Amino acid sequence: MSPSDDTKNEIIDNFVAPECQGRIEILYQDDDILLINKPSGLLSLSGKNQLNWDSVHYRLVNGQEATESQKATPAFAEAKLPHRLDFGTSGIMVVGLNSAASKSLNKQFQDRAVQKRYIAMLAGWVEADIGQISAPIAKDKALFPRVKICLDTGKSAISDYQVIRRLDTPCRTLIQYTPITGRTHQLRIHSLEFGHPILGCDLYNTPESNNGFEGSDTPPRLMLHASDIYFTHPSTGQPIHGQSPSLF
């Protein structure tokens, strides 16, 4: 019996996440929301592969056990994630703690009423101090989980950037990204598209981008951090600005 077209076209994800020693840090908490700091190397949601059970959502719902140096964190049974960060990306996330709050946050993201900012370390020197990258993004089924720039089938994707500083040995640029849209892997593939891939990126890079970082053969992690988030509190209606300083 021959396999169906759906079976033949099914995408198989064999990725197994290594154990993440970093912990979720709770930056702010009230009855409706959390602001948390996600460590690099932790999935936002548990994967279909049973080995990928550990995630931001799993740890929030079940709590984190105490360690020798850190206290346990409570379990939030109704925690929902209105947005995600890539496995390698660290930084700030907002979490809904009840159905009403989660619904409000989901709508804000759908309406593009939430603004996010990221800090990234790029290979090479970015010439312009400020700029915008506009390149449509489409899924790349042949190279899952990668996406691709595609003028024909891609969805509009826009990223604004501002240079923070340029560094030597090797040449690299610390920038602030403000994504106008929120496509999968948007900042990673946009960085590659304009010739300055994010250091430590395993999917979108060049041979030069992962060499010579601070005397090491490869960067220790994806050098992308969600630093700021702006949204409206789901209960009070007050504007919220959450921050998580970058470590690089």
Image (cartoon, rainbow, N blue to C red):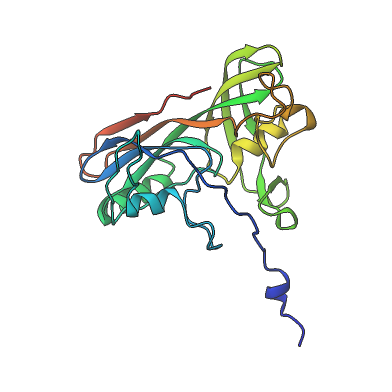
Q: Residue furthest front?
A: 68
Which residue: 72% across, 45% down? 151
Q: Is residue 96 left or right of residue 167?
A: left
Q: Is residue 197 left or right of residue 175?
A: right
216 or 104, nearer to the observer: 216
Above or below: residue 97 compared with residue 116: below
Q: Hey, which quadrant is residue 167 in on the image?
A: top right
Which residue: 20% across, 45% down? 31
Above or below: residue 38 compared with residue 19: above
Q: Is residue 50 visible?
A: yes
Q: Hey, which quadrant is residue 71 in on the image?
A: top left
Q: Residue furthest right?
A: 207
Residue 245 location, x and y as percent?
43, 24
Above or below: residue 76 compared with residue 128: below
56 or 175, nearer to the observer: 56
Which residue: 32% across, 42% down? 66
Q: Is residue 195 visible?
A: no
Above or below: residue 66 compared with residue 222: below
Which residue: 71% across, 33% down? 192
Q: Hey, which quadrant is residue 244 in on the image?
A: top left
32 or 105, nearer to the observer: 32
Residue 188 location, x and y as percent?
63, 37
The N terminus - image quarter: bottom right
Total marks placed = 0
